[in-house]
Amino acid sequence: MTAWRGPVNPSLNYTCGLLVDGFDKPPVFLMTYNPPYYAALIEACGFAKAQDLYAYEMDVAILAQLVERYKPAVMSALEGGGLSVRWLDPSHFDEEIRTYLALYNSALDGTWGFTPLQEAK
């Protein structure tokens, strides 16, 4: 083995990384939370940080303000930007899944640690 990446779950859609700061805050849903000494243990094994991952704290009361703030941009994109939103067509389910995979993979291409989703073989 010439490289190792972790700690990480099988997909970056789940938690990954190691908490190295912010131990004064309680654990939160879908974020890693480990004892503070884990970083020293991992570094003592010869491993080094490859990427910073950030989490942000926000009061949910702000969400309504954000919706109003970004609504004009979203509406503009929907009205004239060639963007469309539609319902999934269950009668063409396999084709819809292939379309989803293509959109998902192209949207995340180039993201650190991203592995494209593939159709089942």
Image: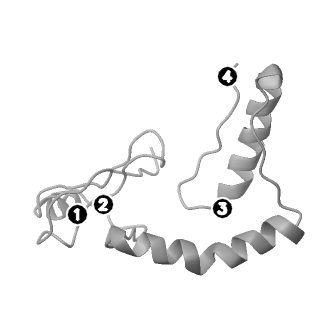
Mark 4 crowdedness (10 Å alpha carbons): few <14, some 14-19, many ≥20? few
Q: What's under tag 2, amino acid-wise?
A: Phe
- Counting every numbered tag in the picture gives 4
Provide residue 86's location: percent of width, then percent of height: 78, 45
The residue that appears at 33% across and 66% down in the rendered structure is 48
Badge 4 vs badge 3, beta-carbon distance below 8 Å: no
Q: Please state the horizontal and vertical placement of residue 99, each as a whole percent of the image.
A: 79, 39
Identify the residue position indicated by label 4 in the image: 120
Identify residue for label 3: 110
Alpha carbons under labels 1 and 4: distance apart = 37 Å
Check if mark 2's residue and mark 1's residue have beta carbons within 8 Å.
Answer: yes
Residue name at image x 15 percent, y 68 percent: 25
Residue assigned mark 1: 43
Q: Earlier in the sequence, mark 1 or mark 4?
A: 1
Q: Secondary structure at mark 3?
A: loop
Is 2 or 116 nearer to us in this picture? 116
First in sequence: mark 2 vs mark 4: 2
Mark 2, residue position: 47
**The residue tagged with tag 1: helix, strand or loop?**
helix
The nearer-to-camera label among 1 and 3 is 3
- Residue shown at the point (71%, 70%) measured from the top left: 74
C-alpha span from label 1 to label 3:
27 Å
Mark 2, secondary structure of its residue: loop
- Nearest to N terminus: mark 1 or mark 3: 1
Which of 32 and 50 lies nearest the eye of the viewer?
A: 32
Foreground disc of the pair 2, 4? 4
Residue in the picture at 57% in, 80% down: 69
Q: Amino acid at mark 4?
A: Ala
Mark 2, Cα crowd under 10 Å, few <14 / some 14-19 / many 20+, is some
Whole-angstrom CA distance, mark 2 to mark 1, is 5 Å
Classify 120 as above or below 109.
above
